[in-house]
Image (cartoon, grey):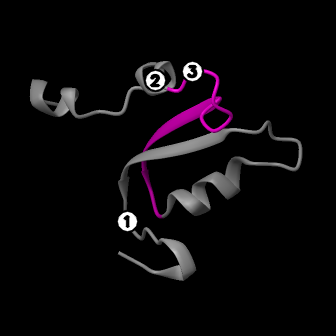
Amino acid sequence: MSPVEALDRLIVNEMQAGLGAAVIGRKITVIEQTDSTNDAILRISTPNSDEGLVRFAEHQTTGRGQRGNRW
């Protein structure tokens, strides 16, 4: 990985530092690649998961937005 690519990486501690006491983002995870972050969060969440769980991906292969819109 080049130094420029390293600067473009998602860094959990930096993201959480900017959120203060917000509920969303209490627990942030970053994965290298996933089909969809929507699906990735469903794979790790349970009915007992804490509020504020967020999952980011460096790369998505089949992302989708609201109402099933794909990009």
Hey, which quadrant is residue 8 in on the image? Answer: top left
Q: Is residue 14 left or right of residue 20?
A: left
Q: CA distance from mark 1 to mark 3?
A: 31 Å
Q: Secondary structure at mark 3?
A: loop
Q: Marks 2 and 1: in contact by CB < 8 Å?
A: no
Residue 2, position as x, y percentages in the image: 11, 29
Q: Residue at x 20, y 27 (%)?
A: 7
Q: Which residues are magenta?
A: 19-35
Q: Amino acid at mark 3?
A: Gly
Q: Residue at x 88, y 42 (%)?
A: 48
For disc 2, the marked residue is 18
Which label number is shown at residue 13?
Answer: none
Which label number is shown at residue 61?
Answer: 1
Q: Amino acid at mark 2?
A: Gly
- The tag earlier along the polypeptide, 1 or 3, is 3
Crowdedness of circle 3 by 10 Å Cα count: few (<14), some, many (20+)? Answer: few
Q: Residue at x 60, y 62 (%)?
A: 39
Which is more toward the observer, 49 or 26? 26
Which label number is shown at residue 20?
Answer: 3
Which is more toward the observer, 26 or 1? 26
Q: Is residue 10 left or right of residue 49?
A: left
Q: Marks 1 and 3: which is nearer the front?
A: 3
Q: Amino acid at mark 1?
A: Thr
Residue 57, position as x, y percentages in the image: 43, 47
Q: Marks 3 and 2: in contact by CB < 8 Å?
A: yes
Q: Is residue 65 left or right of residue 28?
A: left
Q: CA distance from mark 2 to mark 3?
A: 6 Å
